[in-house]
Amino acid sequence: MRFATKIASYAVAASAILTTQSASYAQSNPSYVRLGPVNAARFVPDEGPAPHIAFVSAHRTANTIGSSTCTELAQRGFMAICFETRFRNDNIGIQWEELPHDVKAVVDHAREQPGITRVILLGHSGGSPMMSLYQAIAENGKSVCERLEFFTTCADEDYGEMVPADGIVYPDAHPGNPVQALRSFNPSVTIKDGVKTIIPELDPYSPANGYNPHGSSTYSQVFIDRYYAAQSAKMNALIEEVQHKQNLIAGGEYAYNDDDLIIIPGGNAVIAHAAPDLARELTATRNPAKLMRNDGSFVTENFTSVMVADEDLAAGGDSLDGSDIHKLSTFMSSVAIRSRNALDDIDHCSTINSTICFVADITAPVVFMAMGGYKFIRDHEIMYEVSGSEDKDFVIIEGALHGYNPCTRCETTPGQYGNSTKNTFDYIRDWTNARF
Amino acid sequence: MYKGKKIMNYSRLASLGLFAAALSVAGISAANAQSHPEYIHLRPVSAALYMPDEGPAPHIAFLIAHRTGNNLGTLACSELSSRGFMVLCWNTRFVNNETIVNWEETALDVKRAMEFARAQPGIEAVILLGHSGGSPLMSFYQAVAENGLSFCRGPNKLTQCGDELADLIPADAMYFPDAHPGNGVQALHGLNPSLSIVDGRIVVDPSLDPFSPDNGFNPQGASQYSDEFRDRYHAAQAVVMNAKIAEVEALRARIDGGDHIYPDDDIVLLPFDAQAGAARLDAFDPTVPETMVTAQARKLVRNDGTVVMQIAKSVMLPKPHQALINRTFEGVKVLTTTSFLSANSVRSTHAMDGIDHCSTNSSTNCAVANIRVPTLIAAMGAYNHLRFQEIMYEDSPAEDKDFIVIEGAVHGYTACVPCETTPGQYSNSAKNLFDYTAEWANARF
């Protein structure tokens, strides 16, 4: 279920998990560590010198312990601690401002391990805004997430002393969950009082608008422009609706005195998934960038993702399974974001759930690694551009999917992108060892 | 670091289970101190494997899980491994998410753990540990394994199991440290039948209000509900649950008939029922005999380790603060038609003595009545499942069955310190429980 886990949580890292079981068994015997509400597994190399660098990796809700990430890192000589947050498997209940507690617990644990002198955060997908928030607070103090322009803040949290990480790697980060939500809203669908209405001219699943269930859709630019604007309008309307209900609650004029539920139907209606060729603003760089090719060599070029359209994006678009469900409170902390256009006019710093906002406040060495068979190419380039670090890097891994594994559907010759996972972690290894 | 200051956090901890007491008092330190538990990914199950630090290689394995709670570091993992057993503590695919539970699928996760345990070198016997929400989980698996698919199918069931539950490998024994009667019964007992929502506002029926002093409620201490009120209240709980079942079954029929806005499922809210704010009367009046007292003299394991036969009465303290949560959204269970019908409902005519336990597959009482392997049931003497576990014991067809009550233990096994009248009065509760368990298991396998 999308609202629960399947798309929003598991799927983001699912592709990274393809090699999970065999690799997990083969590598070491990861130790289970319980840190309050956090479940963690500590991986160490099977052989070689004792590691002095520890990676810390997690997703906000998914279980990444069994993903390939920690195994791949341990095989390259690092300690790697993968963990589940207190919001494991729970997209409805996630209160964003509580997550830094969990990152802190694991970072502190990592620093306590004998021989460890450096700690690096790994922010993949939903882990990227979480790790960014932690590091921004650790480097700048809690005031960084107390600014009034945020819909919700961390003002009520007492994180204690947060020790900054020594570096951050972002293998396929995303810009933040609110941006993800914004660009996946289906603005054509409304359900009110049990009645569903669809605005035909905004329907992304309508062949009349160019939808193709069997390949890349052929939306007109007029439709696309209208759609991105409508996604933004829908987000703004939902924010208004939620804030109105919260005001009623605060005034004692609501059935419950604390919270309620909000259901957002319509499926994962992302233009870039239906028609990657028509989303070049997101799937291509604006400037020449470093591309790590499948053979391990590097070129610098203007890059466009080789991503192909999802197969039948509309499947599930009518279902509860394809709906986003939140509490009012979690909507405001994990979904709400100000914008005028879902594509390119977003106020990233209106939410504390934003990779793009907080990388600007982070000065530790950082590398942004876009997967070349997925959709976050321009987002990574933006993160790189706005990064506050003097030691920053940006690389694209050719033909890699969101979970690092090869996009075989994108290949024109078999095995064309077969090294994508290896290349991703080799690059992380070399980047890390060159610095620490 | 973890403040847990918000109401929702209490709710989450409560649903996680479990038991916060066990985890925070002794669990965390014990989990870290004991051995080096190994993380095992048994997709979709995540698990931690605990082995004894020393001594002979174990030949008995315990499997520990909750349907939704996080059990990887729960107290029983380290306590049992330190007594010489292999222990696999694991989380189901539905960990931390009651909304998405599809009850019958949980047995597939037990199967996954069972197959792992059976494959471990030296393991000759596997014992399922069913604590709290783990008790209907483990007992459901075992009842199906022993009796086949007929156990989980039939016109009396709110939901049916599928063919994928055929040929499950049964455990060698069952161990229930503070089992509860099942999630459906838990939901039934938690309902507040005095409340309804009309035109967006909560309406209270004063005659059924458990939080009215007129009915015996005491916001400062122990309430005292009359026999007449309790009987009326429990009958009303059954009426509310039955009405909800009818409503959801009608919704389910519309969905299946293609006559609903969603073709797959819909959200079902069960207001005034979530565990943190449950309106079960024994939370406010811990003397009620329906749940808090055994009907007959039973084995009571006293703090000094001696065992006496006597009527056991819970020493649990009242929890009047639950009343504050009952009417909040945190007191609402957010479910779907699937999770409501499969795991959070049960048919009844009366919430205490008129329950059709076998109307749901999420019922410890029903399952235990169909399990024949050796069974140990251990009620915690400072909680609220004494009588229902005694009923499990009475109904169990196992030739080798045992029932004990651990003096002064909370749901998570540790001592109920606030219940003590002298310091340390119940300080051995967890030790006594696991010592008894180890002796019981070693005597049989």
Image (cartoon, coloured by chain):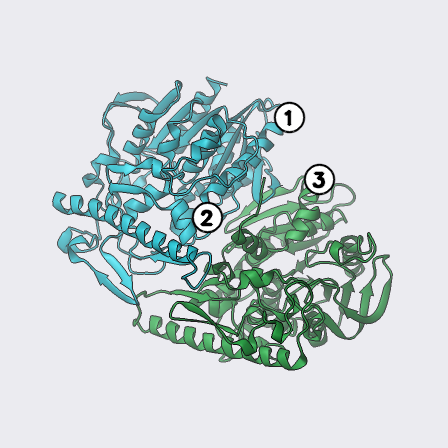
Chain colours: A cyan, B green
Q: CA gap, disc 3 to disc 2?
A: 30 Å
Chain where mark 2 sits: A
Seen at 47% across and 39% down, the residue is: A154
Pinpoint the chain carrying mark 1. A
Q: Which-is-in-front pick, marks 1 and 2?
A: 2
The amino acid type found where label 2 is placed reads Ile
- How crowded is the residue under tag 3: few (<14 C-alpha within 10 Å), some, or many (20+)? few
Percent position of residue B189, x then y:
58, 71
From the image, tell me which residue sits under label 2.
A94
Few, some or many C-alpha atoms within 10 Å of disc 2 (few <14, some 14-19, many ≥20)? many
Q: Nearer the viewer, mark 3 or mark 2?
A: 2
Q: Residue under label 3, please give it.
A: B33
- Does residue B398 appear in this view? yes
Residue B329 spot, x, y in % from top left = 47, 60
Q: Which corner quadrant of the image does residue A296 belong to?
A: top left
Q: Which residue is mark 1?
A: A114
Q: What's the amino acid at mark 3?
A: Ala
Measured Cα–Cα span from mark 1 to mark 2 = 33 Å
Residue occupying image coordinates x 34% and y 39%: A350
